[in-house]
Image (cartoon, rainbow, N blue to C red):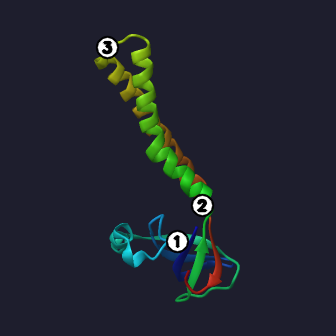
Amino acid sequence: MKQKAEVLRVVKPGYVEVRVRRMSACASAHNCGSCDHCSMMENAPEIVVVAEDSVGAQPGDTVTVETATSSVLGAAVLLYLVPFALFFLGYVIGGALGWSEGPAIVLGGGGFLLGLLGAYALDRYRRKNQIIFRVTAFGGV
């Protein structure tokens, strides 16, 4: 995923601190001016991250940063889809075991909580192994 960023400072040779505005996932697919979802992201919070710098960026420069799309999408799937999938799986298993609706829902809730624990574990892992940002060019996307 490519994003526009502003260089804040040089952390050490080969690494800079950049400010990146979070953007919607559909921003690269169309003209954002006509999209309601993209217009809501105009006031999205900015994040400050350390990025690998191979172009020699200096404070104040506008640069393009890239991240591996697969790592971002993988985190989103784990956070949003897995808990709900486990909820429905638990509910279906409870029904297949002949349980009434109440206990099947409780089993589904257990699956949902298991999915949230997985997301929490991912968050702990990502704090140690953060998504890598790389400065790839001067100028914005």
Closest to the observer, 19 or 96: 96
**Residue at mark 2 to residue at mark 1: CA–CA distance:** 12 Å
Marks 3 and 2: which is nearer the front?
3
Q: Which of marks 3 and 2 is nearer the N terminus?
A: 2
Residue 140 x/y as whole percent = 55, 83
Residue 53 x/y as whole percent = 66, 77
Residue 68 x/y as whole percent = 63, 62
**Residue at mark 1 to residue at mark 3: CA–CA distance:** 47 Å
> Image quadrant of residue 88?
top left
Task: Say above or below: 96 vs 82.
Answer: above
Task: Say above or below: 38 vs 86.
Answer: below
Circle number at residue 28: 1
Residue type at numbered disc 2: Thr
Disc 3 element: loop
Residue type at numbered disc 3: Ser
- Along the horizontal axis of the image, is 135 left or right of 29? right
Marks 2 and 1: which is nearer the front?
1
Disc 1 element: loop
Closest to the observer, 106 or 94: 94
Q: Which residue is drawn at 60% across and 60% down?
A: 69
**Residue at mark 3 to residue at mark 2: CA–CA distance:** 42 Å
- Along the horizontal axis of the image, is 127 left or right of 46? right
Residue type at numbered disc 1: Ser
Task: Say above or below: 51 vs 6.
Answer: above
Q: Answer whether residue 66 is visible to the viewer in this image.
A: yes
Can you identify the residue that label 2 sits on? Answer: 69
